[in-house]
Image (cartoon, rainbow, N blue to C red):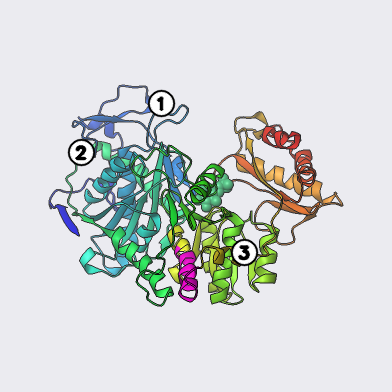
């Protein structure tokens, strides 16, 4: 299903859009020389009048743009910003013009990478989730790419894993593989945010690549203020890629049931598809399988409908979780245990890489019950996946990388961070079991996590660092956070009831009172998340008090949330 919507071919691209190293230098005092540019606001706020890139705004030839700190849009290996105005304290910073510059920067970055293969004209797939800012950003991204002479495959509503997959699919009729893919999403974040994830056939881009792209985007954004209106020279093609991707997933389930056409026939499965499609405002709950309200909603739907299984995704389908017919949640540690059971059946002895907040019970389950190895690494889905890839490269076999957040990737699926594929693995198991016993339901899945020890009390408390506090002496919050962790470590070493975890890759993880805690720095925010698991509230309080004793020494750390937990 192809729909060619636009072709043109002329005009010299604005130098701002050329790859960074080829950009001719602009006059040193461009604003004085360019007749189109005048400033009407104080220099400190640098307001340019911009004529180029205006097409997607539907604006007149002249519009104004604020100076933007592009690097602030980096969120690890993603780009995130505010795309809808109106939420107090969250000013708009992901405008269409910013999005255009970022897309042009990605194209320049990708061209640099692909030039070695002789590629001059790129094909970039663009998809989006259900947010209300999706269309305007899709148009902006498309314009940013076509204005520099590359082609766009517009997929429309798509999932993040599908965008990566489009760089691997061999399908000339649908113009695949794409040289690169852009997913417009802010994952499970609130409706006013949006952002980008970028892919090549090597996987998702890493932090260094994102920084490079944002630096290029910043130059493009500022320099484009001096150019005339850009004509789009690239071709835009609409491709119904989700049908291709979905049919691959359906084939996988059929195959696991001996190529039966309808292996799940008769089962009643409830799906919560991120709770935003169509509206994009997430009216019922945050679309996140880690979120309590989200899990309660899908559990209730399963019970009310007497369904056999419930499945829940986040908005861009890279996170997922399930609920069995009795309403038992299969998320967080339980979902990792379940996936480990499935993967270890296929690959005995393999290493399962997880994030840092996984439970001690999970280690025992993977190692003692399943005969695998649990490698507890850092938080962050990209960290976990990259670590699994690294282990394989040094000869340690690993087939599964998962986070308690519901992100997960399998070696057999190109290490694609894919919530839908995780659920397909569960459905495969179910479909396979039903070929032997047509009456079997989701109990076959629940039985696989039998024996997983779980703590009676599980909490995550997020302690904020006040970045403007005098205690930080103007320094970065990360340094302050590190000094808190260091101090905690020394306090712990003097407490005979507590033991630091022998192997630990992130923060301070400590066992004691029959449970454990982990205090670490958030990947992105000025926050120290504290996870505690214990067999009773009393034991959890003892662990919490040990943290509080160290934390109290640091006046820029807000311990209100911890105090509240301790007093409950
Ligand atoms: O470090 P935190 O603030 O808890 O955030 C950690 C989370 O950040 C992002 O959402 C990543 O996509 C997740 O993979 C990660 O788990």
- Mark pair 2, 3: CA separation: 55 Å
Q: Which residue is mark 2?
A: 55
**Which residue, given by chain and number where applicable, does mark 3 sit on?**
449
Q: Earlier in the sequence, mark 2 or mark 3?
A: 2
Position above or below: 436 against 288? below
Name the residue: 67% across, 51% down: 507
Q: Secondary structure at mark 1?
A: helix
Mark 2: few/some/many CA within 10 Å (<14, 14-19, 20+): some
Left or right of 309? Residue 92 is: left
Q: Which residue carries the number 1 mark?
A: 44
Q: Quadrant of residue 563?
A: top right
The stretch in magenta equals 424-439
Image location (x, y in percent) of residue 509: 71, 53
Mark 3 surroundings: few (<14), some (14-19) or many (≥20) residues within 10 A:
many
> For the residues marked 1 and 3, what is the alpha-carbon distance in whole angstroms?
59 Å
Residue 79 circle label: none
Q: Does mark 1 have its CB less than 8 Å from ligand 1?
A: no
The quadrant the N terminus occupies is: bottom left
Q: Nearer the viewer, residue 386 or 310?
A: 310
């Amino acid at each position: 299903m192809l729909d060619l919507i636009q072709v043109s071919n002329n005009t010299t691209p604005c130098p701002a859009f050329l790859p960074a190293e080829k950009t001719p230098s602009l006059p040193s005092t461009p604003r004085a020389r360019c007749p189109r540019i005048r400033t009407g606001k104080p220099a400190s706020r640098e307001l340019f009048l911009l004529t180029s890139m205006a097409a997607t705004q539907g604006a007149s030839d002249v519009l104004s743009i604020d100076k933007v700190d592009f690097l602030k849009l980096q969120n690890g290996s993603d780009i995130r910003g505010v795309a809808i105005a109106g939420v107090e304290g969250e000013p708009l910073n992901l405008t269409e013009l910013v999005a255009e510059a970022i897309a042009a920067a990605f194209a320049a970055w990708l061209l640099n990478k692909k030039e070695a293969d002789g590629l001059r004209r790129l094909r970039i797939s663009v998809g989006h989730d259900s947010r209300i800012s999706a269309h305007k950003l899709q148009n902006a991204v498309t314009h940013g790419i076509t204005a520099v002479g590359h082609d766009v495959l517009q997929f429309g509503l798509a999932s993040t894993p599908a965008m990566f997959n489009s760089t691997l699919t061999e399908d000339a009729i649908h113009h695949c593989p794409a040289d690169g893919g852009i997913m417009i999403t802010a994952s499970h974040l609130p409706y006013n945010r949006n952002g980008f994830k970028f892919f090549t056939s090597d996987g998702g881009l890493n932090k260094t690549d994102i920084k490079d792209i944002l630096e290029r985007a910043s130059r493009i954004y500022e320099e484009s203020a001096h150019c005339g209106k850009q004509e789009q020279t690239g071709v835009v093609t609409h491709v119904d890629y989700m049908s291709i991707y979905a049919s691959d997933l359906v084939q996988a389930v059929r195959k696991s049931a001996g190529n039966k056409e309808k292996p799940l026939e008769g089962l009643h499965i409830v799906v919560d598809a991120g709770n935003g499609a169509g509206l994009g405002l997430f009216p019922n709950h945050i679309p996140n399988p880690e979120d309590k309200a989200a899990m309660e909603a899908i559990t209730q739907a399963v019970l009310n409908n007497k369904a056999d299984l419930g499945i829940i995704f986040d908005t861009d389908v890279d996170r997922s979780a399930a609920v069995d017919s009795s309403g038992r949640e299969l998320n967080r540690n339980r979902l990792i245990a379940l996936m480990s059971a499935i993967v270890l059946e296929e690959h005995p002895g393999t290493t399962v890489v997880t994030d840092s907040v996984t439970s001690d019970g999970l280690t025992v389950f993977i190692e003692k019950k399943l005969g695998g190895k649990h490698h507890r690494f850092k938080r962050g889905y990209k960290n976990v996946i990259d670590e699994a890839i690294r282990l394989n490269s040094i000869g340690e076999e690993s087939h599964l990388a998962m986070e308690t957040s519901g992100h997960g990737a399998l070696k057999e699926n190109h290490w694609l961070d894919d919530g839908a594929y995780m659920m397909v693995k569960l459905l495969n198991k179910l479909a396979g079991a039903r070929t032997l016993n047509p009456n079997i339901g989701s109990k076959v899945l629940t039985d696989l996590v039998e024996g997983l020890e779980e703590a009676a009390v599980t909490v995550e408390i997020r302690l904020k660092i006040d970045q403007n506090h005098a205690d930080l002496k103007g320094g970065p919050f990360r340094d302050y956070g590190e000094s808190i962790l260091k101090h905690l470590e020394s306090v712990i070493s003097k407490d005979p009831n507590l033991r630091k975890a022998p192997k630990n890759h992130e923060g301070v993880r400590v066992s004691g009172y029959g449970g454990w805690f982990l205090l670490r720095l958030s990947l992105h925010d000025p926050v120290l998340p504290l996870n505690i698991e214990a067999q009773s509230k009393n034991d959890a309080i003892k662990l919490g008090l040990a943290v509080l004793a160290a934390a109290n020494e640091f006046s820029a750390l807000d311990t209100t949330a911890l105090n509240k937990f301790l007093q409950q």
